[in-house]
Amino acid sequence: MSAYSERRLELGGVEIALYEAGQGEPLLFLHGAGTATGFDSLLPLAEHFRLIVPHHPGYGASADDPAIRSVHDYERHYLDLLDLLEIGNFTLVGHSMGGWIAATLAISQGERISELVLAAPWGLHVPEHPTVDAFSIPDAEVAGYLTADLSVFAGKAPDPPTPEFLADRYRELTSTARVLWQHTYDPSLARWLHRIQAPTLLLWGELDRLIPVGQLPAWRSLLAAADERILPGVGHLLFDESAQASAAIVEHAHRHAVR
């Protein structure tokens, strides 16, 4: 299996960490509101794509950027990254908060995106299946909201947590709060999702306690066209919990490829 190579880039005066593996059509993966479990579970995608996994500013190995205070700020950050990397057409995958960023990016950059995958995306207001307020979850219960399989944290989250681990999580939570504290969804997102024309896959874990799978029909009804895949027995960290998550991306790309 491929391994990541790390690059350090400067965007807008902020140093970011970028991880790449594989060759072929670029696949940009936008992660959710945390990096604790890492991204080795995505490496099977590098057998089919040039896999590009940046850490958002304020997360993981990237530097902080307090000026980023909305999903639209992240969207513009990634427009700069795509231009810097000289990427034209690409496959876009976004998970959780990264799914919200990916949907926003796809609305404005549809001509560049060959395939889109939204994995348990944040961003829509679905009153009958509301997203849980992540800031209200007691610390001892966070892991249970993120996964149906607590073994995904084995070897990745120290038990008991070290001060360094807790400091990293607090830093990422602070970055998340800048974006989501006042606006946990985009009230205008539903109006513009119809502009996404790329073949889209909605990917969800059946047991997601954070962003319920019941939101999937709302997303599907607002997109021009979308396939769906629900992974049984899987929670919010679907890529860590099931190899079928990455496999579904490959299947979707092959189904819609003009190659």
Image (cartoon, helix red, strand yellow):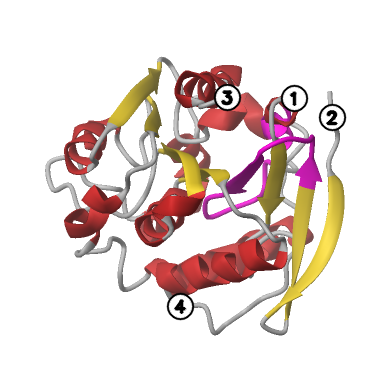
Q: Quadrant of the N terminus?
A: top right
The residue at 57%/30% (across/down) is: 239
Is 189 placed left or right of 230 in the picture? left
Above or below residue 42? Residue 88 is below
Amino acid under disc 1: Glu
Q: Give the SS element for disc 2.
A: loop
Q: What mark, if any, has residue 222 been given in the picture?
A: none
From mark 1 to mark 4, how far is it between C-alphas? 35 Å
Residue 2: which disc? 2
Query: Residue 68, relative to residue 78: is it above or below?
Result: below
Which residue is rendered at x = 61% and y = 71% of the image? 80
Task: Determine the residue located farthest toward the left in the rendered image.
Answer: 128
Under mark 4, the amino acid is Arg
> Which one is in front in this view, the residue at disc 3 or the one at disc 2?
3
- Residue bearing mark 1: 47
Residue 208 in percent (x, y) is at 38, 32
Residue type at mark 3 is Arg
Q: Residue at x 69, y 33 (%)?
A: 49
